[in-house]
Amino acid sequence: MDSRIQEQPLPGQRPQREELAAANSMLLRELYFGCLGGDGNAMTPAMALALDANFGSVAR
């Protein structure tokens, strides 16, 4: 078979492939942000001290 010729997917294959890629992206995103931890409100004292030392304040 000529290497320039690509196999065309069957009509039902492409949506399934795209759905799997989208689901995988969503799962990886949830895992990434889940590993960041915290509730978004509380900051550990060590982090607050590091921000104060390097940037002058924790406030935005």
Image (cartoon, rainbow, N blue to C red):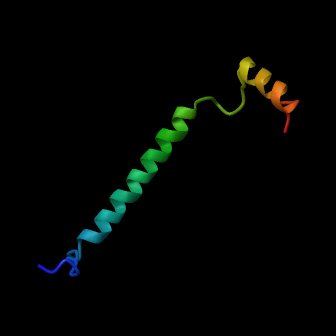
Q: Residue at x 52, y 33 (%)?
A: 35
Q: Is residue 1 above or below residue 30?
A: below
Left or right: where does residue 40 sit relative to residue 17? right
Which image quadrant is residue 20 in? bottom left
Residue 24 % position (x, y): 38, 51
> Does 48 appear above or below 34?
above
Tell me the quarter of the picture where residue 59 sits: top right
Q: Residue at x 72, y 24 (%)?
A: 47
Question: Given the current orientation, which residue lies at the most extreme top position?
Answer: 45
Q: Is residue 47 above or below residue 34?
A: above
Of residues 32 and 40, the one nearer the viewer is: 32
The answer to whether residue 19 is left or right of residue 10 is: right
Q: Is residue 39 left or right of residue 11?
A: right
Counting every numbered tag in the picture gives 0
Give the image quarter of residue 23: bottom left
**Going by the picture, which residue comes out furthest to the right?**
56
Q: Position of residue 22 (x, y in %)?
A: 41, 58
Q: Nearer the viewer, residue 25 or 53?
A: 53
Percent x, y of residue 49: 79, 21
Image quarter where the C terminus lies is top right
Quadrant including the N terminus: bottom left
Q: Residue furthest front?
A: 3
Residue 33 screen position, x and y as percent: 55, 40
Which residue sits at x=15%, y=81%? 2
